[in-house]
Amino acid sequence: MTLNDFKKRDCSGDYIFFDGEEKAENGWEAFQRVVKRTLKGELFVGLWVVLREMIRFDIHTLKYPSEKMQMGPRYRAIHKLLRLFESGNERCIGCGLCEKICIAQCIRMETRIDEKSRKEVSEYSINFGRCIFCGYCAEVCPELAIVHGIEYENASEQRAHFGLKEDMLTPLDTFRAKEQKEFSGFGALSDNADENVKQTPLAY
Ligand code: SF4
Ligand code: SF4
């Protein structure tokens, strides 16, 4: 293919034009069309397909909401802020890397120095109207503090209802009930992460 062929945007020669059916002008013509279509057997084919699916026992439809879809470990849903497994403290150290790398510029955070002269994240929010769920923030976080959850049932009056720190941070009750899994979600470590660690050579 030459460059000129490549640049050619007019592909109308390849189109297949379909004239379609003539519109029914009145009720009698509409009735005739219904009868014609019915006698073609399409209706019965459709009915047979529905009946066949109804009596099948190996259907793959989930009985939602009693059954939930199993999401893959790399599914990127609404973010979660995790706590340290041992102490329950927030993992986030306020380094700001996630805020810097976010290509949609939708992460905002505020930090302050607490009474023990330690940096504390006072506010953390993600504008989910702008987030494109690329996962960069979760991948870059050095503390594995922010990950993507697998929650896909996000019904709310506003997207902003998911985006504040208190929405994303594991609640202490949940944490105490040991429902927060260590390193779960996209951006965290895989189960076999230890096998992939390469030891730093110490002898030169
Ligand atoms: S997933 Fe991507 S767009 Fe969304 S907050 Fe993280 S870095 Fe920004
Ligand atoms: S979530 Fe991670 S990358 Fe973002 S400020 Fe906290 S520690 Fe840093």
Image (cartoon, rainbow, N blue to C red):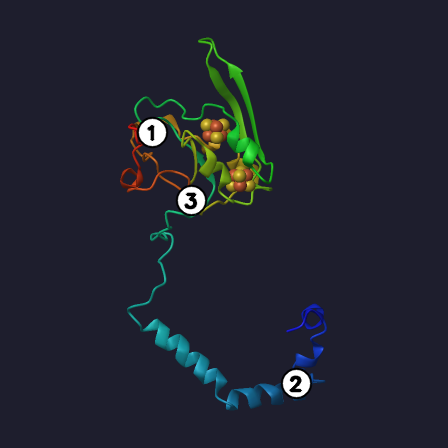
Mark 2 touching mark 1, by CB under 8 A? no
Among numbered discs 2 and 3, the one appearing first in the sequence: 2
Three-letter amino acid code at the position of disc 1: Phe
Placement of 102 over or under 88, stated as above or below: below
Residue at 36% in and 59% down? 62
Please give the residue where the numbered disc 3 appears in the rendered image: 151
Please give the residue where the numbered disc 2 appears in the rendered image: 21
- Location of residue 170 by image quarter: top left
Query: CA–CA distance between discs 2 and 1?
Result: 63 Å
Q: Where is residue 44 shown, x and y percent of the image?
A: 45, 84
Three-letter amino acid code at the position of disc 3: Glu
Q: Where is residue 61 shown, x and y percent of the image?
A: 36, 62
Query: CA–CA distance between discs 2 and 3?
Result: 46 Å
Residue 167 relative to residue 192: left or right: right
Residue at 35% in and 77% down? 52
Please give the residue where the numbered disc 1 appears in the rendered image: 175
Residue at 45% in and 79% down? 46
